[in-house]
Image (cartoon, rainbow, N blue to C red):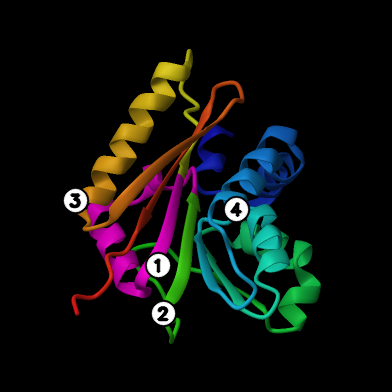
Amino acid sequence: MVRQFGHPRGVAGRVVGQVLAHRRSNRQRNRWAVSLLDVRPADRVLEIGFGPGVAIAELAGRATRGHVYGVDHSEAMVRLARRRNAAAVRAHRVHLAQASVDRLPDFGEPFDAILAVNSLGFWPDPVERLRRLRDLLRPAGRIALVSQPRCPGATRDTTARAARELQDLLAQAGFTRFRVETLDLEPPVACVLADNPAAPE
């Protein structure tokens, strides 16, 4: 069952999806992360690893004239997220695909913001993946990486270390203007925000 949280599939994967969708701390963490991204009505936004689609719904509620895209490697999560966001999917404002972060589809135009909540730990070669995501952002576009450590005995110090690691990965990938925010859950949640550097004049 623990493995299902990394790649939910089948009946057990649907159970995991329901747990993630209804656990109060998960909903709170996702809504908080979205609030930090400062999504505007006309923005194009991408979420990597959207799970049951809680943050997708929050993003769609803010990008009311824009478009929200999401990729998740779990077919079970794609089905759950499409159900949760059915009206926005029908209106062609939300676009969800089964894909992995190392095999992203073509999204067309650049994004204004990118979000990943508790998924980077499953990415192969995260620095290279972050470089690719930076290529998908417009100049001065925003990224938010969220981590709530789930290892046994995780503390505030564990969260602080996770935030430093995320910031280091983002720096290696060429992002700048870092900001770290913390949500006081048990254990605390860290969100590291950064910008894609503006193109030189």
Q: Position of residue 192 (x, y in %)?
A: 41, 43
Kindly identify which numbered label has been placed on residue 110: 2
Helix, strand, or loop for circle 3?
Answer: helix
Q: CA distance from mark 2 to mark 1?
A: 9 Å
Q: Residue at x 75, y 67 (%)?
A: 85
Q: Residue at x 62, y 40 (%)?
A: 29
Q: Position of residue 8 (x, y in %)?
A: 58, 49
Q: Nearer the viewer, residue 47 or 193?
A: 193
Q: CA distance from mark 4 to mark 1?
A: 15 Å
Tell me, yes or no, whether the highlighted magenta stretch contains residue 167.
no
Decide if residue 37 is on the left or right side of residue 27: left
Q: Are marks 2 and 1 in contact (CB under 8 Å)?
A: yes
Q: CA distance from mark 3 to mark 4?
A: 24 Å
Decide if residue 54 is on the left or right side of residue 34: right
Q: CA distance from mark 1 to mark 3?
A: 17 Å
Residue named by callout 4: 34
Q: CA distance from mark 3 to mark 2?
A: 21 Å
In this picture, is 100 found above or below 25?
below
Sequence-first disc among 4 and 1: 4
Q: Which residues are magenta?
A: 117-145
Residue named by callout 3: 172
Helix, strand, or loop for circle 4?
Answer: helix
Dot 4 amino acid type: Val
Residue named by callout 1: 141
Q: Classify the position of the C terminus by image quarter.
A: bottom left
Q: Residue furthest top?
A: 153
